[in-house]
Image (cartoon, grey):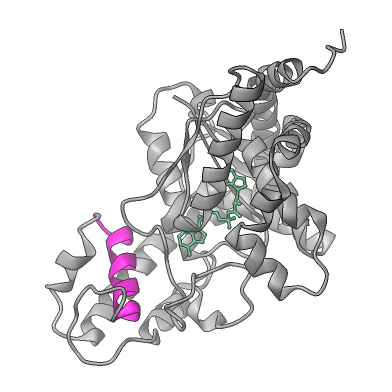
């Protein structure tokens, strides 16, 4: 079975990215067969072009995200780590996806609605973003897509497009499904616990833990997290979103004990926060140590990304050729 997932190099990656996705990818990788083509993890740099950006910052973020992926423990001998723009199959298949998706479907995507409402001028790429994301997944015939909750709607659309394409033009694509982590699928902002902890947010930055935050600063952010009325530690995301978020984070940083079970161990918010801060720092410190090792050796990162792109291209080309053929395009030779 093949797995594909990606992370966008906009803003600095957060604890939400780690707990909802990246940490899980590294765990999947450790339990896999030895075929590195079975699991592909991509820095989706083309997706970063959908919102206004600085070219130099994009280059930096792309390296940072690639380095963080390796620092989480992804092993390039056991999976494929690469940059989206290095593999032409993604954009070649996007056009095919755009021809099968309706513009109404794209306009209904929650992320499009939210992001377009925040911007003065909206690029066409922001609207067609989910077609590129479907192409990312379908180009590899991926069946499982491990993502946080905020990406589930996009994966559902990729699923619909795979079925639609297969029905219209013949079976080409396996139908993918989103896989959510057991805990941490929706990490919330520590200051505004009804909002997602997002890396490109410019509001409530004190509520965002960045993976490269100095441990002291991450600890402070947890200790200052907004909690809810009352004093009792219970897991109730509706009534007590702040406390529930802390319990979710503790669960995802620890051994996966259910948040409701964790709640029974605490008599005060203060004790809970202090354990959450310890758990977060215990995850960040080794990650940052590995990050620094890799960051000192950019040539190795480049080599890994090049080899990853070669392998990814070889895996994607047959799917793209089959789709071009099925839809009626004449083969080039
Ligand atoms: P991106 O870069 O926003 O996020 C990368 C991954 O992190 C997860 N995530 C979270 N999980 C829990 N809590 C949070 N607060 C949180 N914030 C982010 C996301 O769900 C995601 O799994 N469009 C995608 C990237 C993408 C992709 C793909 C993913 C492009 N093509 C194909 C899967 C398959 C995105 O912007 O993720």
The quadrant where residue 82 appears: top right
Q: Give the answer, above or below, for where 182 lies relative to 83.
A: below
Residue 316 is a magenta residue: no
Q: Name the residue furthest top.
A: 333
Q: Position of residue 75 (x, y in %)?
A: 49, 36
On-image quarter of the N terminus:
top left
Look at 69% across and 16% down and name the residue there.
Answer: 322
On-image quarter of the C terminus:
top right
Q: Is residue 86 visible?
A: yes
Q: Give the answer, above or below, for where 6 lies relative to 257.
A: above
> Magenta segment range?
240-255
Q: Nearer the viewer, residue 113 or 24?
A: 113
Look at 31% across and 76% down and name the residue there.
Answer: 238
Q: Position of residue 71 (x, y in %)?
A: 51, 49
Look at 42% across and 35% down and name the residue there.
Answer: 29
Residue 241 is a magenta residue: yes
Q: Position of residue 191 (x, y in %)?
A: 46, 84
Q: Give the number of callouts.
A: 0
Q: Position of residue 121 (x, y in %)?
A: 83, 69
- Residue 294 appears left or right of 21: right
The quadrant where residue 185 appears: bottom left
């Amino acid at each position: 079975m093949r797995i594909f997932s990606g992370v966008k190099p906009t803003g600095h990656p957060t604890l939400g990215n780690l707990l909802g996705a990246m940490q899980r990818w590294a765990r999947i990788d450790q339990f896999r067969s030895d075929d590195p083509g079975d699991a592909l993890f991509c820095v989706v740099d083309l997706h970063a072009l959908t919102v206004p950006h600085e070219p130099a910052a994009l280059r930096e973020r792309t390296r940072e995200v690639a380095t963080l992926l390796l620092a989480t423990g992804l092993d390039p001998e056991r999976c494929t780590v690469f940059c989206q723009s290095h593999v032409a199959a993604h954009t070649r298949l996007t056009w095919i996806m755009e021809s099968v998706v309706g513009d109404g479907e794209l306009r209904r995507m929650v992320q499009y609605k939210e992001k377009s409402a925040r911007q003065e001028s909206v690029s066409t790429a922001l609207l067609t973003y989910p077609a590129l994301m479907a192409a990312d997944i379908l180009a590899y015939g991926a069946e499982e897509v491990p993502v946080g909750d905020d990406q589930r709607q996009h994966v559902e659309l990729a699923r619909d497009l795979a079925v639609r394409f297969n029905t219209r033009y013949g079976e080409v694509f396996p139908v993918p499904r989103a896989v959510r982590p057991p805990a941490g699928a929706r990490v919330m902002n520590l200051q505004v616990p009804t909002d997602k902890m997002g890396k490109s947010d410019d509001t409530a930055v004190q509520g965002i833990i960045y993976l490269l935050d100095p441990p002291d600063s991450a600890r402070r952010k947890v200790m200052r997290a907004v909690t809810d009325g009352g004093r009792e530690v219970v897991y109730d995301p509706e009534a007590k979103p702040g406390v529930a978020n802390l319990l979710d984070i503790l669960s995802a940083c620890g051994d996966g004990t259910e948040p409701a079970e964790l709640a029974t161990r605490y008599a005060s918010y203060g004790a809970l926060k202090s354990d959450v801060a310890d758990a977060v720092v215990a995850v960040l410190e080794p990650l940052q140590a590995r990050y620094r090792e890799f960051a000192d050796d950019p040539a190795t990162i480049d080599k890994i990304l090049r080899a990853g792109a070669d392998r990814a291209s070889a895996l994607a080309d047959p799917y793209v050729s089959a789709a071009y053929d099925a839809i009626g395009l004449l083969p080039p030779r």
